[in-house]
Image (cartoon, rainbow, N blue to C red):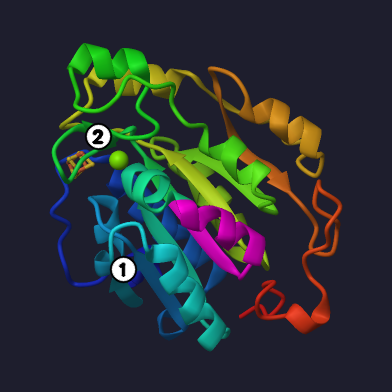
Amino acid sequence: MKPKDYRSELEPVWCTACGAFGVLKAITQALTDLEVPPEKLAMVSGIGCTSRLPGYTNAYSFNSLHGRSLPIATGLKVARPDMRTLVVGGDGDGFSIGLGHIFHAAKRNVDLTYIVLDNGVYGLTKGQASPTTETKFKQRRGLAGPDEAPLNPVMLLLASGCGFVARGHAGNLPHLRTVIREAIQYPAFSFVHVLAGCVTYQKPEYADEIYHRCDVLPENFPNDDFIAASEAARGERFSLGVIYKKSPGEPLPDGSVTDDDDMGIWRGIQVS
Ligand code: SF4
Ligand code: MG
């Protein structure tokens, strides 16, 4: 299998140079690396520009309801634990309409990989502010929506007890490929926050600024240390890499253990 073998016959209708092309490429590269058979691959999305991604992938695909990709994928994985199940979407779909599902997905810890392309704007519905829109960007563009401090998705997932939290940038493909690969390999719920540009509703200077606020974590970063992970998730700059990776079986920061045997499917122990 080559990356192009994981592409469907549909041609993407995204704007030229949309960050979603990078995410599609990195996912197909990671699947190639892992030699995942397409008949054992399921991709579920909600609604939005990024949510078109399953349709462009050679997999069992479900472009579902706005914000509801995680519960649908959870049901799929519980019924068919042999399927590698990827969930994809954007920041509006995941962090606004779908926000409530994230905590439960992390808590249930079913073996899903949730990849969110975050361009800080609603693309499909034409440029409203999303929960991750930075205030100065919103004010500069006059986007619809409240002037509120942006959500920090990595902090949110850490606080939810997610055992694998990573971040990449759609403009750094070799790095994103490795991050997504490691997330798919993780035998429980994993989350990848992907920063990306929207060429239609972001000014190039803004996308450029976000890109230059990224720092790739050093190879020896202690990503098994929750405190170090929380420090890396804070602040104005964006740490890229596997920020937190808890070994299955280790207690969560609140002291609870996630993977007792009798909760095998729910806790993500059954690895396809
Ligand atoms: Fe991509 Fe933005 Fe165009 Fe949507 S509107 S396809 S997010 S560039
Ligand atoms: Mg968006």
Q: Say whether mark 2 is within 8 Å of ligand 1.
A: yes
Q: Please state which amino acid type lies under the numbered disc 1.
A: Thr
Residue 122 lies, in percent from the top left, at 24, 39
Q: Residue at x 68, y 68 (%)?
A: 187
Task: Give the Cα distance between marks 1 and 2.
Answer: 21 Å
Chain-order first, disc 1 or disc 2: 1
SS at circle 1: loop
SS at circle 2: loop
Q: Residue at x 35, y 50 (%)?
A: 97
* Stretch of the chain drawn in magenta: 100-115
| Left or right for 92, reference 77 | left
Give the position of the N terminus as an image quadrant: bottom left
Q: Name the residue that disc number 2 marks.
A: 198
Q: Please state which amino acid type lies under the numbered disc 2.
A: Cys
Quadrant location, ligand no. 2: top left
Q: Residue 58, can we see it?
A: no
Q: Residue at x 36, y 54 (%)?
A: 89
Q: Name the residue that disc number 1 marks.
A: 57
Q: In the rendered structure, does residue 113 fall within the stretch colored magenta?
A: yes
Q: Residue 168, can we see it?
A: yes
Give the position of the C terminus as an image quadrant: bottom right
Q: Pick the residue in front: 149 or 44.
A: 149
